Every structure is written in C-alpha cells, then in structure tokens.
Amino acid sequence: MRSDDIFDHQVRTLVSLVQRLEGTKGNDEGHKERVRNFVSFELIGRGSADVIARALGELDDQGADRLNDMVNHCSQTFYRRDEVWNTIAIPVALNWNIQQDSAFRSNRGDDGCLKELAHGIRQCAGSQAVVLDRHFYSATELYRAEARQLHDHLQQLVIGAPRLAPALQSMSLRSVNESSWRTTFLLGSEIIDRKDRSRLQDPGVQDALQSYLHLGADALTGRNSAMFRRGARGETVCHGPLYLRDAIRSGAKALRGYRLRQMLREIAKEEKRVTLYYAFDPMRYAFELLLAGKWLAFGLRWALFSDEVNDNFLKEVELAMVADPMGAAINVVEMDLEELEAKRKVTTFDLFRPRRR
C-alpha cells in the first residue's frame, strides 16, 4: 500500500471513530478510549498531528470540537498501563526590585520546599504521587511544548527514563533594575490510578491547598536568600497548582491583574485625580488601557482569552481597585481605539505596555 493510501486510511479511521463517539454524545467509554488511544499514538508515538489536522477538516463542527477537546486532553494527560500522568503547573508571580550592582541569576528552586509542596498536593488531591521539577519555566515555553516533549519530560522526571525528544528549555530569573510583575512556572506530574478521577481542580481541593502555597514562594526566595541579603525587595505570590493549560491561563490572568494594580499604585503616589481610559482592539482581542493624571500616564494592554466576554473586563478592573485601594479618585471612561491612540501620543511615560516591534 502506498504511503498516501496509508495516510488516507488513517484519516478515515479517525473520522469514523470520532463520528461514532459523537453519535453517543461523548458518553460511550469504549468509543472514547479508542479515540483517545488513536490521538495519543499520533501525538506521542508518531510525534505528528498531520492525520489529526486532516480529520478535523473532514468532520462537522460538533465532531471537530470533540476531536479538538481530545487533542487538548492528550497533550497534557498521558495514559500508562495502570496509571495516568497529569501534567501540572504552578504559576508564581514575582515583583523583585534589585539594585544594578547586585546582579543575580537563578534557574532552580529549593528542593526541600518543592518536596513539601508536592507532598501537600498529593495529600489534598488524593493522588498516588506528585513530582515537581526544580527548574523554572516560562508560559511561552510550556504553551508551545508538544505532547511528545511533555511526555518525555515527565518520564525523565518521574522514572528517570532517557530523553527521546528535545528537552524543554528552563528559564532563569535575572535581576532587574525596575520592578515589574512577571510570572514563572513550576512544572510537575500528578500520578493517579487509571480507575480514579482527577480531583486536583475541585474547589474543595483548591481551598485545602491554600495553606501549602507559601512553599511555592519559599522555593524561589529560600534558595535565593543571598539575593535578598544584597538588597533585593519585592513580593512573591504562589498560585494554586492546576493542569497545564489551565495553569498557563491562570498565570496570565493573574499577571495582568498584578500589573494593573501596580499601575494604579504608582500613579496614586503623585496624583489626586486619575482617569482610566480604555478601548477595545478587536484585531488583538485586547483592551488598551491608559491611566492618566495631571502629570503622569501609564499604558497597559489587557489581553483577553478567546472565550472571555468583554463585559467581564470592568468587573476585573473593579476587583483590582478593591484589592489595592488608593487615595486617588478614579474616573473610568470608554473611548474608541483611535481616540485612545491620539490621547496616548501626548503621554510621556508608558512603562507597562508592550513595545511594538
């Protein structure tokens, strides 16, 4: 059989499997397992999504959504003989201000704190085991990691298996002269029995985990105590562990909130009356913000996720103001994008808005 014929046969097989699953509204466990096994083999065994991409184009909207959900699931959840390895990540937000003559760099956390944190996650979620990597990772690196890379990374982390795929690139935390919030991620694996249900993201489990989150912050600050003895100042906030895609989203949403609160705090030091101008940019699917007083102005891009509703933006802004109340009176004004860009041109200080390349 020619390679083209083999490829077409694989596409037809996957389309048929998804259609059968869709015919049961996704409720048949046997059909679900067959689709999952097929997708997992393509992503991890072959390391290719070509068959999946073609199948997505041949399915109707409901079937394509069903297959896409399975791809997302199999890209971070790995099924073994008797176990399931869930990829978990922990967003840690930090705002460290370090003097220029105290340059510092770190790329790993404190082993003791990470082991305690892993133990706490295992206890709260009822997992068989939880293993955390000592290194730090950026949201970009984790978001673009392929399923084969993640599977290979977890195998090396959990059982010490040799690497077969390109390694994930860890990040270093470097000293900066001007403090601004940023995020890093701790990466790991939650191991559960195949017969068990994943409970990590249950509200009760997340509530119980709150008493352990200081260990995530301590993992960064404890190992880097020399940096703080040399004059570093700032905050470190560990957020709850989530499954990978949800953790990346949680970290991004937290970061935009921290930066908005910092922007509000900075301008309130000098201004008594402040106006927050905002405009929606449909091309970037983001809000452009301009916080302006008599003497200072700050800009920020508030990026939205594809399933976020625009109306929630003002609620989050209000929450940011409540979380960090200021002495300045704030007036909120909506503008169209052209008006906001024109007003931005007359401002002189724009620390938080990404520079255009």
Image (cartoon, rainbow, N blue to C red):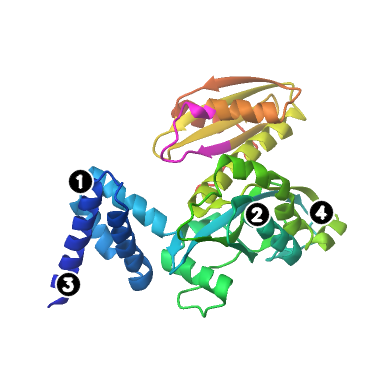
Task: Please tell me in which quadrant of the rendered image residue 25 appears.
Answer: top left
Q: Which residue is mark 2?
A: 123
At label 4, the amino acid type is Ala
Q: Is residue 182 left or right of residue 102?
A: left
| Cα–Cα span, label 4 and label 1 | 56 Å
Callout 4–callout 3 Cβ contact below 8 Å: no
Q: Which residue is mark 4?
A: 232
Name the element at disc 4: loop
Quadrant where the N terminus lies? bottom left
Q: Where in the figure is residue 259, as x and y percent of width and height?
A: 64, 40
**Mark before the other along the chain sequence, 4 or 1:** 1
**Mark before the other along the chain sequence, 2 or 1:** 1
Q: Is residue 115 visible?
A: yes
Q: Where in the figure is residue 290, as x and y percent of width and height?
A: 58, 31
Q: Where in the figure is residue 285, as x and y percent of width and height?
A: 43, 38
Name the element at disc 2: helix
Which of the two discs, 3 and 2, sits closer to the camera?
2
